[in-house]
Structure formats: structure tokens, C-alpha cells
Image (cartoon, helix red, strand yellow):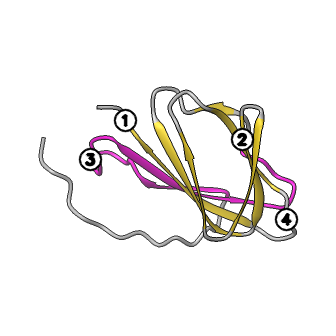
Amino acid sequence: MKDPKPFIKTLSAKRRFKRLLGVSGESRGMRSGLVALKPGESIGWHSTEHKEEALIILEGRGKVYLGKKTVTACGSSFVYLPRGTCHNVKNTGTGILKYVYLTSQPR
């Protein structure tokens, strides 16, 4: 398999979700996307399964639910999710909550 070439993608969110990394041939183990949630909207409960995940909050205010634990996150926040973490993200602010997620496959 050939090594992927470097690239740049624009982070403007004109829709709720935009995949940034993980399209065919771009990476061997990382996935990434931009998420934009309206006030009151949530991404829905899901699990990291066997992957680690990081959330980088770009703007807005929200809550990250990590099982029974809740973390308040706002612009410039970073949230790490270990493997097997059941989680949800909800916009609790009055504007758009925009964040980038990054996942990586285990070695």
C-alpha cells in the first residue's frame, strides 16, 4: 500500500457532519470529522468500541456525557475518550456547537 499524500481540508461546517479524514486511501488507521450541532441537538449515544477518540471543541458550548460522568466543554476544549467509552455530545449553548473528532485504530 502506498503512503497517503498530505492534504488540507476546509473546516467550514455547512451541514451537520463532514468527514475530514478516513476516505479511501487517506489514512491507514485514523478517522476524523467535523460536527456542527444546533442548540439542543445531540449526536446520540455511541461507543468508541476498540478505538481511542479525541474531541476538539472549536466553538460553542456543550456537554460531553461519558457513561455516568458529564463534562462541560466550550471553545478550545479537548476531551479524550478511552477505548470502550459509551458517550454522547449535546449542544447546551445558544449558538452552534462545532467540534472535530479524531479516532485511531489500536496497534
Is residue 32 in the magenta section? yes
Helix, strand or loop for disc 2: strand
- The location of residue 1, given as percent across then percent down, is 13, 40
Name the residue located 52 percent from the left edge and 50 percent from the top edge. 54
Q: CA distance from mark 1 to mark 3?
A: 15 Å
The mark nearer the N terminus, 2 or 3, is: 3
Is residue 81 in the magenta section? no
Q: CA distance from mark 2 to mark 3?
A: 29 Å
- The location of residue 68, given as percent across then percent down, is 77, 32
Task: Identify the mark at residue 49; answer none if there is no mark.
Answer: none
Name the residue located 24 percent from the left edge and 64 percent from the top edge. 6
Residue at numbered disc 3: 25
Q: Amino acid at mark 3?
A: Gly
Residue at numbered disc 2: 88
The mark nearer the N terminus, 4 or 2, is: 2
- The location of residue 31, given as percent across then percent down, is 42, 46
Residue at numbered disc 4: 93
The mark nearer the N terminus, 3 or 4, is: 3
The mark nearer the N terminus, 1 or 3, is: 3
Q: Amino acid at mark 2?
A: Asn
Residue at numbered disc 1: 105
Q: Which residues are magenta?
A: 16-43
Q: Are marks 1 and 2 in contact (CB under 8 Å)?
A: no
Name the residue located 45 percent from the left edge and 33 percent from the top edge. 51
The mark nearer the N terminus, 1 or 4, is: 4
For the C terminus, the image quarter is top left
Q: Residue 106 sits in which quadrant?
A: top left
Helix, strand or loop for disc 4: loop
Helix, strand or loop for disc 3: loop
Q: Amino acid at mark 4?
A: Gly
- The location of residue 29, given as percent across then percent down, is 32, 41
Q: Amino acid at mark 1?
A: Gln
